Image (spheres, rainbow, N blue to C red):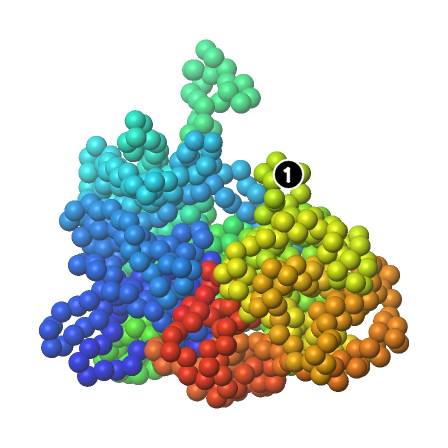
Amino acid sequence: MDLAYVCEWEKRPKSNHCPSIPLVCAWSCRNLIAFTTDLKNEEEKDLTHMIHILDTEHPWDVYSINSGHIEIITCLEWDQSGSRLLSADADGHIKCWSMTDHLANSWENTVGSMVEGDPIVALSWLHNGVKLALHVEKSGASNFGEKFSRVKFSPSLTLFGGKPMEGWIAVTISGLVTVSLLKPNGQVLTSTESLCRLRCRVALADIAFTGGGNIVVATSDGSSTSPVQFYKVCVSVVNEKCKIDTEILPSLFMRCTTDPARKDKYPAITHLKFLARDMSEQVLLCASNQNSSIVECWSLRKEGLPVNNIFQQISPVVGDKQPMILKWRILSATNDLDRVSAVALPKLPISLTNTDLKVANDTKFFPGLGLALAFHDGSVHIVHRLSLQTMAVFYGSSSQRPVDEQAIKRQRAAGPLVHFKAMQLSWTSLALVGIDNHGKLSMLRISPSMGHVLDMNMSLRHLLFLLEYCMVTGYDWWDILLHVQPNMVQNLVEKLHEEYMRQNAALQQVLSTRIVAMKASLCKLSSNTVARVCDYHAKLFLIAISCTLKSLLRPHFLNTPDKSPGDRLTEICSKITDIDIDKVMINLKTEEFVLEMTTLQSLQQLIQWVGDFVLYLLASLPNQGSPVRPGHSFLRDGASLGMLRELMVVIRIWGLLKPSCLPVYTATSDTQDSMSLLFRLLTKLWLCCRDETHPSEPDDTLIDECCLLPSQLLIPNVDWLPINNGIISKLQNKQLIRLQFGKAPGLIGHTVSSQFDVFVRAPGQPKIDHLRRLHLGAYPTEECKSCTRWKTNYNPSKEIQ
């Protein structure tokens, strides 16, 4: 492990962000991190409980929310889509924060619930029934269905038709469980019930889910001499009211309390966690004293109940008829450790066919198998989630322990050491975020090899497997990019494309845009593939424009055939290979293309981009031998050229309805039909590469005609990429970067980043909205949306202002 970057708050004279106690953080599948601080105002002498949300690619651009919680925030929890956040406080109030207009820096509190005056100690969204298991031992299989399988898992609660019902569950300090359900009409159904008849104090709790749709709650009163209690919670809706049923499950005592050598050594249980939200059979416990801790891993198993010989003679037990009971058994335990300050658990749902503690040699260092323990000396250990054996260690600046006893005393007298108070692992377990007792945020890389020496092929295999997982699930893959070096890019892109092409046509269509975005993010990390980033970005934008324009087409009659106007357009344009745009157009039902005049005019900037892009590609055809020139891959891409050809036909028809929506060209002749000329050349180029298995070279006549284009039309400058101000390319040299919240860094340009300057507008030039293709001028008066993942994921839910 090593530090990638740290980000801290600016010191102010009158108001400062200080770590909240307890300090909580959460990491979403979109690689958004939420954490809490208290804003201390020295003049008014009050605390404001803040929630901060940041994107890992732009950690300095933090968005701070005044939570409105009166008491300290005790829990933060992302939903499975990463677009909603739950916060709970020590007064029993729970708030649901939703992303507004797909903006990562705009959040609003929409709904909530409360248990008045009862602090919340555990919080979770209800399970939606979606669980995709990773089969690490099958990472070499060709079919995604073998590597990632859908696990049969029932939602916590379903609506009519089996649709999962949304909501959350919380546990309070007095032993109450409260469930809130979000109805489709926006109403909230809330019910509260006691976990058991005899209520007792709950200092620690955690929540997990079973495959049958039940909920398991683990609780502890904080004392290691008391049992850790488990309860099954069933949620249902009866007569439009939420109903909660609870049942006591087998409990356990930590082994350290029964060991005579450690009986009174660890008086308090400080951490209680299920190993995963959907793994209610395994739990992690940590008991501590002032200076040290011990960690134990327990598993719930079915065991046969022994029957007395007397009853055996009366009624012999045969085969499966033996009575079974559930019993907790300890899997592993650590030796005495330094005091544990925080625990972070993996989120990867790894499925191993091997026995629990004996995994295959090529998978035992897989990152998702480890959990993180932070200690008061500032160090962080990654340990195996079942055997608890150390897999990797990170030593912070304060964790280099002195060797002599006098130095130890001086160090303790100097004050408390800097250590993580809250930690979270990323969704692929390749990165770890920690927030220390001074409020500083640290981002750590976790090597795919877990500190062990693996050959390049094995490292590439791990990264490729996780990239495929993100492609299938739709999760963001920023944390994987932390480990990609320039010499890996070419291999990863090629292998990713090979694996994609092995899938069936239906799955390829679903993943078509994700793989393009993933290739763009990888190519950005190498100076040898910069031009390909421009092509991938342009292809994403072309697909988005094509989908948008085709979605506006409406059938003239309601009782139309199965195919939509967009599908018929694609079919006709692929069959009719005529180079005359008007002859292609007369084969279409033009009444399906009728739109309102205002709608057509609002599309002009997108239409202009299509026209400029076609002109640029055709003008660059004579230089097709240069792969470093942007647009090179389009000249051999029959599918993209066919898409451009379809759009040219649509634009031609719309131009008859409203000529002002047509693309504007600067031509040397007033009588020249620029649209017809470009369509003719585009069709000839498309015919050369429409058959991807047997493409042909463009003939000399086509190349000569394209050579004449600069003398006939003014070739536009294409704005390939938005301004690149992310941090991922600056982290490749493995040097620590120090940042400050609220201040954009003056980072020294990385060699890869400097290659992008050719394709990016200079800061002094007029700005452009790259999502809407609007020219805003040099000093725009309003803020515009920009995609925080332009290099990784062209997804509107990633936009920020």
Secondary structure, mark 1, is loop
Q: Where is 643 relative to 706, above or below?
A: above
Q: Can you say which quadrant of the picture contains the C terminus?
A: bottom left
**Pointer 1: what residue?**
560
Estimate the x, y position of residue 3 in percent, counting from the top left.
Answer: 46, 76
Left or right: 324 as drawn, with respect to 355: left
Which one is in front, 510 or 684?
684
Q: Determine the residue positioned at 72% across, 62% down.
A: 645
Which residue occupies the extreme front position in the image? 671
**Residue at image point 60% right, 81% down:** 759
On the rendered structure, is 342 left or right of 649?
A: left
Residue at horizontal 67 percent and vertical 62 percent from the top:
652
Q: Looking at the rendering, which quadrant does residue 800 occupy?
A: bottom left
Relative vertical location of residue 403 with respect to residue 31 in this rendering, above or below: below
Evaluate whether residue 161 shows in this view: yes
Amino acid on which disc 1 is placed: Thr
- Of all residues, the one furthest to the left in this rendering is 44
Q: Is residue 281 left or right of residue 756?
A: left
Q: Is residue 277 above or below residue 789?
A: above
Relative depth, front residue between 235 and 790? 790
Residue 636 as seen in the image, left or right of residue 78: right
Q: Residues within 10 Å of mark 1 (few under 14, many from 20)?
A: few
In the figure, residue 187 lies in which quadrant?
A: top left
Q: Position of residue 537 (x, y in %)?
A: 61, 70
Residue 370 image offset from top left, x and y in percent: 49, 59
Q: Tell me where residue 443 appears, x and y as whole percent.
A: 43, 72
Residue 606 seen in render: no
Q: Residue furthest right?
A: 700
Q: Which residue is drawn at 47% across and 16% down?
A: 312
